[in-house]
Image (spheres, rainbow, N blue to C red):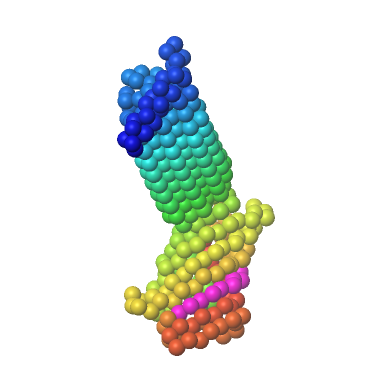
Amino acid sequence: MMKRILVSFFLNFLLCGMTFSQTDDSKRAAFQFSFMPFMSTNGLQAKEYTNKVSINLLSGLSKNEKAFAFAGLTNIVLNDANGFQFAGLGNYIGNNGKGVAFSGLGNVVRNSYSGFQFAGLGNYIGSSGKGMQFAGLVNISKDYSGFQFAGLVNIAKKVNGVQFAGLLNIAESSDWPVALVNIIKNGDLGIAVTYNEIGSMVVALRSGGRHTYGIVGIGYNHKVNRYVTAGGLGAHIHVTRWLTLNNELMGETLNNFSKYITFKVGYAFLPAFRLTPHIELFGGPSINYIQTDDLRNVDMIPDKHIWRKFGDTKFQQVYFGYQAGLQYFF
């Protein structure tokens, strides 16, 4: 009985596709069903058809898609695709796209795309993009307007919007890059030496665009003789050509490669004075939370506090501090 129902179901699918298909030069189909390319209701001429709705068990092939395309593995559209695309592995558009695209691995658009893209690994747009891109690893686009989010890297030429990456943003022009490292051709790139209230001296790479920047550095704490690793994000408020108000969220760890780790996170307000085109002096107050498993490190922490908690094996404190530094711009 179930076998007859399934056979009847698939026969109706095929008949439906053939009913709505046209055999003139435009080759349009309101509905298309396929198992894989050339095994579909559009037959061996599948690559010449413009479909409104496509259901592909494994992989589908078409000239254009107008509204909806689903594939267990891949959707392959040789020209334009509009509407919603979903693929277990990947979506490919040979020209332009507009709408929403989801894929388990990647979305590839040879020309331009406008809308929302989500990919488990990466999104690629050969020309201009507009909207939102989310990728587990990497987004690549020539020009992009909107929001790019990548677990690892964003790569673009000109960005009008926000780039957010777990590690690295690369662009010729991007005013709002958010990552630990930002390689922006018309942005800022500098090396800074900083010192704070617990005795940590850090050498950091500070890189970004006009409004936001990233910080990553290493150093040494002379009070407790521990190595320091630091990272954070910052935002500029430009007041004059020589005065900038920097706002930074920073994290810092101190350890000597043992099981004991001291962790500090905080916000700092840092007025920065541009002394020369390449040299900047900055400094200001901070509010911090610190936690250490090594109670011997408590002595380096300022005694005045907002809140503190002693435990048998852990110390925690919230307090005001400071940070000061000197930066050289390349």
Q: Is residue 89 left or right of residue 22?
A: left
Which secondary structure class fits the magenta region best? strand
Residue at the far top in the pictured view: 24
Evaluate whether residue 139 shows in this view. no
Which residue is nearer to you in this view: 159 or 146?
A: 146
The magenta stretch spans residue 231:
no
**Residue 79, horizontal then vertical, whole percent:** 44, 24
- At x 54%, y 45%, the residue is 147
- At x 48%, y 41%, the residue is 117
**Residue 288, horizontal then vertical, whole percent:** 56, 73
Q: Is residue 318 above or below residue 176?
A: below
Which residue is nearer to you in this view: 320 or 2?
A: 2
**Residue 96, horizontal then vertical, whole percent:** 48, 28
The magenta stretch spans residue 288:
yes
- At x 51%, y 70%, the residue is 265
* Span highlighted in magenta in the image: 284-292
- At x 35%, y 25%, the residue is 40
Q: Is residue 146 left or right of residue 81?
A: right
Q: Is residue 171 left or right of residue 260?
A: right
Quarter of the N terminus within the rendering: top left
**Residue 258, horizontal then vertical, whole percent:** 33, 78
